[in-house]
Amino acid sequence: MTAFILALLAGALVGLALGSLGAGGSIITVPALIYLLGFTPAEATTASLIIVIVTSITALLAHARAGTVRWRAGLLFAAAGLLPAAVAGALSARIPATVLTLAFAVLAALAGLRMPRRRTPPENRTVSAPRAAGAGAGLGAVTGFLGVGGGFLAVPALVAVLAVPMSAAVGTSLLVIIANALAALTARAATATTLDWALILPFIATAVLGAWDGKRLSAKVSPATLQRVFGSLLMAIAAAMGIGALL
């Protein structure tokens, strides 16, 4: 199977995850780029930021049309993460590949464990400025360092910390993800990382299309089933990346 076909298939899987769950897709992107398409960890995390930005913008437009984006809360949350995202993005290019891979494996395992247990967090909590700033900064650092959107972290944080209604949390999280990813990508612009656009572009194309299919899938399959499937996939990815980095 050619790298071009693999890029199309991997992009479609990422889009399905983002479209059906609003999270998890970007965590599949990095290992797909490394193990299927031959990117180095530094190249994969940078390319992932580009894919995350384009796919998230597409999804954000759909949520904006539906009126499910809390712009003020999202921008405030994103503002706290911009500097950490930029610093972590610049630092990531200087981290040894093994360390970067192990860190990503840990994050994938965390996402895999949390996803099947996702519940609707209680809404209408009191907003705490220090907690909001800390959560925003932490999410920005994760996005910048590992090249992931962090939707599985952003959605519950927006609900629990900024009291964003669950009905608007996914759309608002996309705004945060885009801002953090742009900051991280800008910080990496000065690095010598080269990217294979012949593989990135088809990956993006099917990710965008897959996101629309994911929305339709979510209407036919129960969220609990989707969460278990993608959670199991993430645990397998985490195990494979951890073992591969240590061998």
Image (cartoon, rainbow, N blue to C red):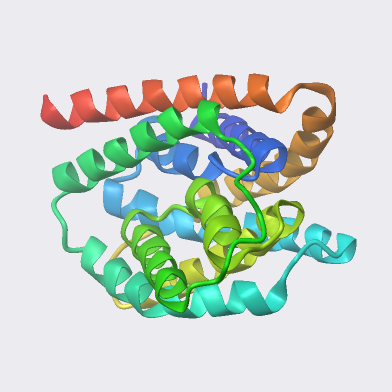
Camera sees residue 89: yes
Q: Is residue 84 above or below residue 52?
A: below
Camera sees residue 196: no
Q: State the image coordinates of residue 88 (x, y, percent, origin top left).
A: 28, 68
Question: Which quadrant would residue 230 be assigned to in this image?
Answer: top right
64 to the left or right of 201:
right
Q: Is residue 63 above or below residue 79?
A: above
In the rendered image, the quadrant that contains the C terminus is top left
Name which residue lies at 24% across and 41% down.
101
Q: Is residue 125 above or below residue 111?
A: below
Name which residue lies at 67% across and 35% down.
16
* Towards the viewer: 157 or 231: 157
Q: State the image coordinates of residue 13 (x, y, percent, origin top left).
A: 61, 32
Name which residue lies at 34% across and 41% down.
107
* Towards the viewer: 76 or 53: 76
62 to the left or right of 93:
right
**Count of numbered tags:** 0
* Towards the viewer: 13 or 175: 175
Q: State the image coordinates of residue 55 (x, y, percent, origin top left).
A: 65, 54
